[in-house]
Structure formats: structure tokens, C-alpha cells
Image: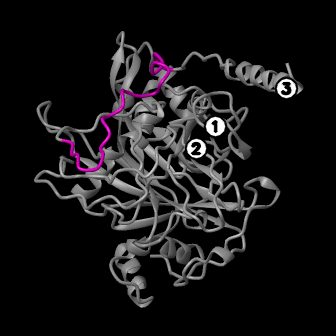
Amino acid sequence: MSPSSRRFNQITLVVISILLVTGSGLLIALGPPPDGRGAKPSAPTLGAGTSSHEEAQPADLDSPADALTPANSQAETLNDSEDGQSAQNTRLPAPDRAVSGSGAFPSTRNSRGSPIPGLVTIRNVPVGDSELEAAWKQAAHISCEFIPPNQPFEITRPTPFLTDNDRRQATSRNLTAGMRQHVLSVGLHMSRQDEQSLPALSKLQILDYIHAHYVTIQARVQRDPVTGIVYLHHRPLAATMQFTGPRLTQEFTDTVARSVHDFRSLGLWLRPGEESTAENLRTLVLADRYETGQSISRYTKPKSACELMFIRARVRNENTAPGSRARSDSVRALPNDDTSDLVLHTFVTTKGRQSLHYIAPDSDLHGSQQCGIRALIRITSFAHGAYPTGSVVVGQEVRSSATYSKDKLNGFSRKMGWTGNCFDHLSQLLDAIINKELTAD
């Protein structure tokens, strides 16, 4: 056997040994674990020329790569249905390239400014009620992917495995290393009435857990392997954290997992005609649906609300003047191969997308009151009459540093000479807010 063959076999054995290592699960504090996957089976994917006549089911958050249907061009217009619930007229064009379910794209040698394949993009932000509802349902396969327990709060240097799904996909795909960064904290609380209705056997345990934990929504950050320019991936991440103690991720309970599943990615925003190059892939659009109150009776569904969330990535001191078109030579690579100079800005809408909130940066979190979003949850089902197995979000409070009405945003858009509504120039609009070009309400 030649020296090169022996070396190849040694490397192969090392790789196999690494792939066989798996983390042991922890006992979930509340109720039975979400079967190791964190959600229900994934919904059927929609390809070009196909349509869905059934409501999308919650996706398996660790589903294999083939369960994803990415699109490198904008989704076709979502037609309003009579009740705003059906997505049967919704279509997505066929993908140019399959994408790994782990959220990492296959490594390719891209020249400067060439498009990056395998990413879900969006060119029109859905703002109508039924339009957004349909987009949210279709995005069931791009809900937040769970970060395993006992991991650091953030990973700011490239690593090949950010989730268990990354590790599983490593044997079949050549994945690009990624990083992850916190963008939003979500605290949980319950109404006094719902607290009083909890089972006596587990009431204190449930409330202690809710008061001691929060959810971190995180963005997956990747780097063009040739230019070094960083960009966002379309698939978001989520982890459970404790307000006090070691800053290590915790095991998800089934109750929290179902709530987090409602945060879904609609894709990376691009202007019409704009290519999916790294410097343009810096604005992520997500949607979150929650119930707004109890149903009138057991025969009717409770009303729901759907809101948008935007994540805007910027490198410190780069040129992002409002009204200017992003240029490749103005977007630099990060130094030291990390995200220390990358700043992620988070925005959420409320009141049916009539208000846009610039989320205040998290400082020291000691309770749900300091979180960017404080979600009011209701536990809907119990196992053995004591342990939560289902829950819904019935309301939200937003902690923002600035709030802008849609009328003000549209007025600024007209002042800048932009056509269409304010969200048709999403990245420029968010940059103008970050640059303090707009006066808050």
C-alpha cells in the first residue's frame, strides 16, 4: 500500500469516528420530550406547477435535505382565498439546486460577485392578511431549527456542525462551515387566569420553568468561500436558555418547541433583478403566527394574527447610505475569520403590519420583561393530567427602541423617490432606520 493510500485510510477512520459521536439527551423539565425531533412530520413540498389543497402541517425541524424546496427566484404571487386560510393557489418555482436541510449550502468556488446557489429568496414581502397567511403555511419546512443542548450561547467562528442535522448531513454533502448569532430573545409568561387553571400536581414546576427560561432566535451566518464576504442563510435557529447560570443551551420542552415552530423563514430578500451574491444576502424575512384570543366555542377556531420579522446584517463602518445601491466593493470581508464586526439588527411588525418596531438590543436578561418579545402562552393539553404536551401563543408584547407607523415609512419611501410600498425597498429602508434617517413615532 502506498503512503498516500495509508494516509487516506487514516483520514477516513478519523472522520468516521467523529461522525459516530453523539450527544446524550437530557431529561426535559416539563413533560415528555418532543420525540427527539422537536416537531411533527414535515409537510409535502411544493414544486413548480404544483399546488396544495390541504393545510400545511408542522414540519420536522430535523428533516432530511430532500424535504426542502428552495427557490433562487421570487415566489409567484400568493392569491387571496375567501377565508384567508387556503394556500391552494400558492406556487414556488423549481429550485436551481437542492439545499441541505442543515442550512449549509454545498461548497462551490464562486468568483467575486457570482450568485450563491441553494438559497431560498423572496422578492416581494407579503403584507396582505391572506397573502401572508399562505406564505407562512408554505414555509412550514423552514421553521426554526433547534440548537442541541449544552452548546455555547453563540458561535462566532466557522464550525462545520451547528445542529444535529448538520452532523447527519455531513456524510452525504460537502457543507460549508457556519456561525450563529443571537437576534431576538423571547420570554414566556401566562395570564393569572391560566396560571390558576394549571394542575395542582405540576403548577409550581411549570411556572418555575417559564420564569427561569427564554428562547433565543438566532441567524445562521455563512461566508463566501472565495471572497470571505459574510451573508445570512435562509434557515433560522432557536435554542432555550436560562436567565441565570451557565450560558449553555438547554433541552427544549414540547410546550416551548411547538411555540417556536411558529417562527418561519420566508427567505432572503432581494430586489427584483438583483442577484443572490453574498453582499446582497443580508436581509432575512420571517413570519410568526399566534392566536389573538380564545375561540367563541369549541366548534370555532380562535382568531390568529400573522406578523413579520426582519433581520438586517451589517458590517461595522460599511457604506449603507439610504437610497444608494449596494456595491460589491463597499462590502468587505470580516477580519479574523469571525463575526466580531458583524451586527445583526432585528425588526418586528405589530397591529397587522401597520407598525414596525426596531428591537432594543438585549443587555443582561433577568426575566421575560427584558426580552425583545414577551409571549403570552396558554397550555392546551396535558399528559397524565399534569405534564404539558401542547401550547399556543395568544399574545405578544414588544420591547422596542423605536417604532414607526407604516404611513411614516411609506412617506419616507416617497421622499426618496422609491416606487411601490415601503417594503419593496426593504434593505434600504432598514438601513435608513439604523442610520437614524427617520424620526420615530
Q: Position of residue 326 (x, y in %)?
A: 58, 77
Q: Residue at image x 60%, y 67%? A: 279
Q: Position of residue 133 (x, y in %)?
A: 27, 51
Q: Which residue is mark 2?
A: 104
Left or right of residue 12, residue 292 in this image: left
Mark closer to the chain start, 2 or 3:
3
Q: Quadrant of residue 424?
A: bottom left
Q: CA distance from mark 3 to mark 1?
A: 28 Å
Where the N terminus falls, by quadrant?
top right
- Name the spot of residue 127 as percent of width and height, x first: 30, 63
Residue pointed to by mark 3: 7
Which amino acid type corresponds to the residue marked 3 in the rendered image?
A: Arg
Q: Are marks 3 and 1 in contact (CB under 8 Å)?
A: no
Task: Name the magenta segment's main secondary structure.
Answer: loop
The kind of residue tagged 2 is Ala
Q: Considering depth in this image, is 380 or 224 the residue closer to the camera?
A: 224
**Span colored in magenta:** 30-52
Q: In the image, 409: left or right of 8?
A: left
